[in-house]
Image (tube, rainbow, N blue to C red):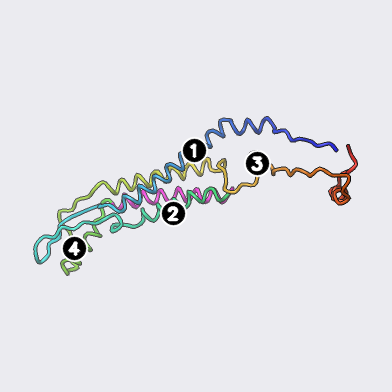
């Protein structure tokens, strides 16, 4: 019986090592790095002090401060969403991958916007001042802000870049649990050789449409 050995097409090998493939690998590495670092930075910055001030209470002046999570929880929440979307990009294909990549980009954009808007927000400190004084009309004085909101915005920007790369190059990225060769064709199954001394092998070959007596 004759067996035919499949030979890889030269165009397939060229496509796997060509400029498009190299761009895909570079974009994948950059997106993973930017997405992971951006989410970590945004989460870290949200736990730091964003603003501080002084509130006038009955016993004198009281110094108060607010963390990023006190001002707004949006950057941290969107950082978690972006990190989940970055992982989910490799679990879906085609239209699903584009949608998840878009969610990744939107998460980064939303984190940037929320962090920038929260940089000058004093409502969290005003609430603390009102609670400390027992007077809802009490507001904070001598308000100062730190650079941490802009650090959170920088983390969101990295997530945004990762999302943009996923939208543009994500179609060329690998998927989890792929059952196909790199060429995209199903992996061929090797047929077991027919033993002419085993009648069951002869019948199985005939069921497959093969000639068990062929040389």
- Residue 116 in the figure: left or right of residue 35: left
Read off the residue under disc 2.
Answer: 81
- Give the distance between the C-alpha atoms of the residues marked 1 and 4, in whole angstroms: 48 Å
Which residue is at the far front? 197
Quadrant of res 11:
top right
**CB atoms at circles 3 and 1 under 8 Å apart?**
no
Please, what secondary structure does the residue beneath circle 2 have? helix
Foreground disc of the pair 1, 4? 1
- Residue 73 in the figure: left or right of residue 35: left
Quadrant position of the C terminus in the picture = top right
Quadrant of res 15:
top right
Read off the residue under disc 1.
Answer: 27
User: Considering only order in the chain, which callout, 1 or 2, is on the residue closer to the N terminus?
Assistant: 1
Read off the residue under disc 4.
Answer: 129
Label 2, residues with CA under 10 Å away: few <14, some 14-19, many ≥20: some
User: Considering only order in the chain, which callout, 2 or 4, is on the residue closer to the N terminus?
Assistant: 2
Label 4, residues with CA under 10 Å away: few <14, some 14-19, many ≥20: many
Foreground disc of the pair 3, 4? 3
Read off the residue under disc 3.
Answer: 181
Please, what secondary structure does the residue beneath circle 1 have? helix
Foreground disc of the pair 4, 2? 2
- Give the distance between the C-alpha atoms of the residues marked 4 and 2, in whole angstroms: 32 Å
The magenta segment = 93-118
**Residue 210: x %, y % from top left:** 86, 44
Q: Is residue 166 magenta?
A: no
Quadrant position of the N terminus in the picture = top right
**CB atoms at circles 2 and 3 under 8 Å apart?**
no
> Is residue 107 or residue 177 the one in the foreground?
177
**Residue 57: x %, y % from top left:** 12, 64
**Residue depicted at x 50% and y 40%:** 28
- Residue 21 in the figure: left or right of residue 124: right
User: Considering only order in the chain, which callout, 1 or 3, is on the residue closer to the N terminus?
Assistant: 1
């Amino acid at each position: 019986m004759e067996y035919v050995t499949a030979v890889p097409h030269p165009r397939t090998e060229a496509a796997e090592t060509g400029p498009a493939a190299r761009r895909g690998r570079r974009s994948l590495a950059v997106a993973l790095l930017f997405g992971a670092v951006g989410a970590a930075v945004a989460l870290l910055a949200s736990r730091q002090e964003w603003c501080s001030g002084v509130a006038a209470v009955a016993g004198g002046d009281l110094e108060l401060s607010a963390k990023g999570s006190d001002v707004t929880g949006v950057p941290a929440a969107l950082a978690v969403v972006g990190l989940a979307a970055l992982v989910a990009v490799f679990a879906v294909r085609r239209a699903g991958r584009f949608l998840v990549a878009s969610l990744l980009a939107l998460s980064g954009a939303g984190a940037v916007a929320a962090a920038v808007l929260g940089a000058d927000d004093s409502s969290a400190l005003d609430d603390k001042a009102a609670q400390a004084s027992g007077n809802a009309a009490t507001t904070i004085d001598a308000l100062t802000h730190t650079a941490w909101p802009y650090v959170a915005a920088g983390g969101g920007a990295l997530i945004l870049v990762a999302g943009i790369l996923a939208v543009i190059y994500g179609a060329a990225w690998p998927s989890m649990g792929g059952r196909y060769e790199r060429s995209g064709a199903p992996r061929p199954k090797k047929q077991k050789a027919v033993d002419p001394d085993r009648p069951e092998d002869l019948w199985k070959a005939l069921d497959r449409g093969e000639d068990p007596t062929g040389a």
